[in-house]
Image: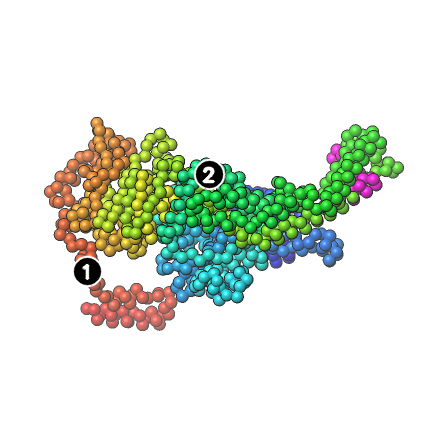
């Protein structure tokens, strides 16, 4: 047995091997130690290997999914080795001592899950591969639980942003990729060959050319090939459900980098949970598929105005007609997740219940079609969705006739084919029922004949039907002429057989086995009927999800008093009465009212400098406007009185920062890296929010950096920008930067107490309220008094010297200053030293290098 186990383990060395032994999956050696620790189960030993006891642990087959979920969550991959023959078949093949054949039938990983119990119904589960050819990157992404398959060609610098959007459960990268993302699976480079990838994709789609699916670049083909190879390995040669690949164009969506997603908490909070995110505050969907689609919409807002307006028109339809909205949401709420049911069926892991879910979902989809087809005028998007609900009538009728109303998950016990569908099956069931009634009559007869009132006829998987009596009543049945045959003695009970019982049991077993075989044949037939309409069913699932999202956004808009955004051709950003949905919900829960604020950016006022005290609402104001841009371009109403917007091509946020210890970056370094990315990538159509740039270093350094960044955003990027700061000296820039506008969050001191109004007003803040905020935070009175004294002295010195910004009035603008910076003087000696690869030098080369450096040093004297 160990020879067989070790051979299977060698074929999946990176996985924990679940080795099927009867009713248990067993694990041995290091796998057992790792699994026992992760699952908190007992670690035992079985036999010896090379003189050492073999560590072992196991889990029951019937509850394996629960343990799989915990192992996958802990970061493991699991290979399932199933028995490929019965003990009887093994004995017939190779004699009485034959080992039952086993093979790995599936590799379970975080990105290849389809089981309902292992997945979050409201979250997509992406498996992503990154391909690289000649310096260019491509991504292939698949959610095999629904079959969604995307390929993406990436411009320079866009890889991190796309990976942040997808948030993959598993990420595959080639072994040649430098600086691979944390947690990525290093996959052999040969799997990322673009020519092999093209062949794999053609084979998957069953075509001779890919021209009908789009012009795929070599990096995309490399990524797709690696992803398909990984899925083939996971399915041990069989592929899961994959729709034809959709070629995603980066320019069609607002680009949002990883740092911006994290700071804006779009789909998850900084604590890593859905609660507290923008998605959580917006989501009113009633289906898992709708929740997944809404998350995808918010993660990748559109840049095509026509597509955005189509989504908004559909939302507006459900806003206007509350009765229609309520009726449709009631229907959707009762729908099963047919997309994931289809994924399990295509993967070969479908159950009778999955077929029942297809039946019910497709049937209700047709009912929704009848409800919506009479709407006039019909929104363009609705017209595109409605045909997806048609064409399933024959399949639905077939499944209705064939399946019971509530099919079971487990097909092994039968009972899922409806009575009346197959007369022969009904006859087999009838024979089995008659046999069971005969056995019940036998039980009564045996009680009367033996006088043992406690006698029972029972059934188990080992003995089949048998007679069971208490041990104290067993002696009469042990007699040779009793008509009963002893089978088994246990503590307290004795078990027997009898000729009449054996005869009836055979009839029941035979009819039952034949009935199960007949049901299994029907299940295969029904599965094939569903598989013949895979693409059409997937389209229906997508259409149902889009209706759920549209009606949910309408519900949210009515609930929150949200408004439909209007889109303009210029770069305006005119939001009146804007609010942050997450903060507004938190404020409402505490019984207070959220203070709405306007944000009116235009060509001549595209850069707002916002000052004011901490806790005054600056960061909230910045974030709420970024959130409004996301919601609007996702096709959602927005939390505002009105909104006129120009399309945002890229969204950047530098709000808050923390150490990145894993990469050896301090808070200030993280801040500067993020700011550098903004200055390098923001275009005139971008929207940028910057909060307290420069605060992570000394006052003078921080002010200098903030000053230069404001100038760069104004003169070079020329994008729409909200810049919050405590450096009041920056307000001087308004005198020279024509598109810079000054604003502040209002605060007042009343009877020695600070009152934060959370209201935005024009002009700079009249003063700093840092000490007042410190008082709110609970600093001791003595510390506050000392701080006031120090502040008076500093302000007196500031008045005498002109302050931190003294001498900056005559400083030329950013472009002129940049032009005036002298070119750095070359240093051949330094360049030579920096080029040295010390580890690669031989002793002779090192000596030659020393002489060369001495000559360079002499030449520079």
Residue closest to the far top: 751
- The reply to whether residue 273 is in sight is no
Measure the alpha-carbon separation of dots 2 and 1.
Answer: 63 Å
Observer-nearest of 301 and 667: 301
> Is residue 256 found inside the magenta-colored segment of the image?
no
Residue at 84% x, 36% y is 478
Q: Residues within 10 Å of mark 1 (few under 14, many from 20)?
A: few
Q: Is residue 827 left or right of residue 117?
A: left
Q: Residue at x 27, y 69 (%)?
A: 853
Residues rendered magenta in the picture: 491-506
Which one is nearer the viewer's eye here, 833 or 595? 595
The N terminus: image quadrant: bottom right
Nearer the observer, 781 or 358: 358
Q: Is residue 354 above or below residue 444?
A: below
SS of the residue under disc 1: helix
For marks 2 and 1, give the one nearer the viewer: 2
Which mark identifies residue 324? 2
Crowd tier of the residue under label 2, counting other residues whose Cα lies within 10 Å: few below 14, some 14–19, many 20 or above:
some
Do the numbered discs 2 and 1 sit on residues whose CB atoms are within 8 Å?
no
Q: Position of residue 286 (x, y in %)?
A: 48, 40
């Amino acid at each position: 047995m160990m020879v067989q186990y070790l051979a299977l383990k060698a074929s999946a060395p990176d996985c924990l091997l679940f080795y099927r032994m009867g009713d248990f999956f067993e694990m041995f050696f290091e796998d057992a130690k790792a699994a026992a620790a992760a699952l908190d189960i007992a670690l035992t030993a079985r036999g010896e290997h090379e003189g050492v006891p073999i560590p072992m642990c196991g889990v029951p087959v019937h509850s394996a999914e629960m343990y799989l979920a915990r192992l996958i969550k802990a970061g493991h991959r699991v290979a399932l080795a199933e028995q490929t023959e019965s003990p009887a078949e093994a004995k017939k093949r190779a004699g009485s001592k034959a080992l039952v054949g086993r093979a790995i039938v599936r590799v379970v990983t975080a990105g290849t899950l389809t089981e309902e119990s292992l997945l979050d119904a409201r979250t997509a589960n992406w498996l992503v591969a990154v391909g690289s050819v000649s310096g260019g990157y491509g991504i292939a992404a698949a959610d095999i639980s629904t079959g969604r398959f995307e390929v993406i060609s990436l411009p320079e610098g866009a890889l991190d942003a796309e990976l942040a959007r997808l948030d993959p459960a598993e990420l595959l990268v080639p072994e040649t990729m430098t600086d691979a993302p944390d947690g990525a699976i290093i996959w052999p480079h040969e799997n990322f060959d673009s020519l092999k990838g093209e062949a794999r994709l053609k084979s998957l789609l069953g075509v001779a050319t890919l021209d009908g699916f789009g012009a795929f670049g070599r990096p995309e083909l490399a990524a797709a090939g690696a992803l398909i190879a990984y899925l083939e390995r996971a399915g041990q040669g069989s592929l899961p459900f994959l729709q034809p690949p959709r070629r995603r164009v980066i320019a069609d969506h607002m680009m949002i980098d990883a740092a911006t997603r994290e700071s804006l908490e779009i789909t998850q909070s900084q604590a890593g949970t859905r609660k507290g995110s923008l998605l959580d505050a917006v989501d009113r969907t009633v289906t898992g598929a709708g929740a997944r689609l809404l998350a995808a919409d918010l993660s990748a807002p559109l840049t095509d105005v026509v597509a955005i307006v189509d989504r908004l028109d559909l939302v507006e339809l459900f806003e206007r007609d509350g009765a229609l909205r309520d009726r449709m949401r009631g229907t959707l709420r009762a729908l099963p997740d047919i997309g994931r049911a289809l994924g399990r069926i295509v993967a070969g892991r479908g159950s009778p219940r999955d077929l029942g879910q297809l039946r019910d979902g497709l049937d209700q989809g047709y009912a929704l079609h009848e409800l919506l087809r009479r709407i006039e005028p019909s929104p363009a998007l609705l017209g595109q969705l409605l045909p997806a609900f048609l064409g399933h009538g024959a399949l639905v009728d077939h499944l209705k006739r064939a399946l019971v109303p509530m099919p079971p998950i487990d097909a092994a016990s039968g009972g899922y084919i409806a009575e009346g569908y197959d007369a022969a099956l009904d006859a087999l069931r009838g024979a089995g029922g008659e046999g069971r009634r005969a056995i019940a009559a036998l039980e009564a007869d045996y009680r009367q004949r033996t006088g043992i009132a406690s006698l029972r006829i029972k059934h188990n998987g080992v003995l089949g039907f048998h007679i069971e009596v208490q041990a104290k009543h067993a002696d009469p049945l042990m007699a040779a002429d009793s008509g009963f045959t002893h089978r088994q003695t246990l503590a307290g009970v004795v078990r027997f057989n009898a000729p009449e019982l054996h005869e009836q049991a055979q009839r029941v077993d035979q009819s039952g086995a034949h009935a199960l075989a007949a049901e299994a044949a029907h299940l295969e037939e029904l599965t094939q009927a569903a598989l013949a309409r895979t693409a059409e069913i997937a389209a229906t699932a997508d259409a149902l999800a889009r209706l759920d999202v549209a009606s949910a956004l309408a519900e949210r808009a009515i609930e929150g008093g949200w408004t439909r955004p209007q889109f303009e051709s210029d770069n305006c950003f005119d939001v009146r009465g804007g609010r942050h949905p997450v903060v507004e919900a938190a404020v409402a829960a505490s019984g207070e009212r959220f203070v709405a604020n306007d944000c009116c950016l235009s060509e001549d006022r595209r850069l707002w400098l916002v000052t004011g005290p901490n806790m005054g609402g600056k960061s909230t104001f910045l974030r709420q406007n970024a959130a409004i841009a996301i919601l609007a371009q996702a096709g959602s109403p927005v939390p505002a009185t009105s909104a006129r917007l120009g399309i945002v091509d890229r969204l950047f946020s530098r709000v808050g920062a923390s150490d990145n210890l894993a990469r050896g970056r301090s808070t200030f370094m993280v801040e500067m890296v993020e700011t550098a990315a903004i200055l390098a990538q923001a275009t005139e159509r971008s929207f940028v929010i910057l909060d307290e740039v420069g605060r992570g270093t000394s006052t003078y350094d921080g002010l200098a950096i903030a000053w230069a960044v404001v100038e760069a955003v104004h003169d070079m990027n020329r994008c729409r920008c909200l810049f919050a700061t405590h450096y009041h000296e920056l307000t001087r820039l308004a005198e020279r930067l024509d598109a810079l506008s000054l604003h502040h969050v209002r605060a007042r001191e009343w009877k020695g107490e600070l009152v934060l109004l959370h209201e935005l007003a024009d002009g700079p803040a009249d003063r700093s309220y840092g000490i007042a905020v410190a008082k709110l935070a609970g600093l001791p009175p003595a510390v506050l008094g000392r701080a006031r004294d120090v502040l008076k002295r500093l302000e007196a010195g500031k008045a005498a010297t002109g302050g931190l910004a003294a001498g900056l009035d005559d400083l030329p603008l950013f472009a002129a200053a940049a032009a005036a910076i002298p070119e750095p003087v070359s240093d051949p000696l330094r360049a030579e030293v920096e080029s040295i690869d010390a580890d690669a030098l031989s002793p002779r080369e090192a000596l030659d290098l020393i002489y060369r450096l001495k000559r360079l040093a002499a030449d520079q004297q």
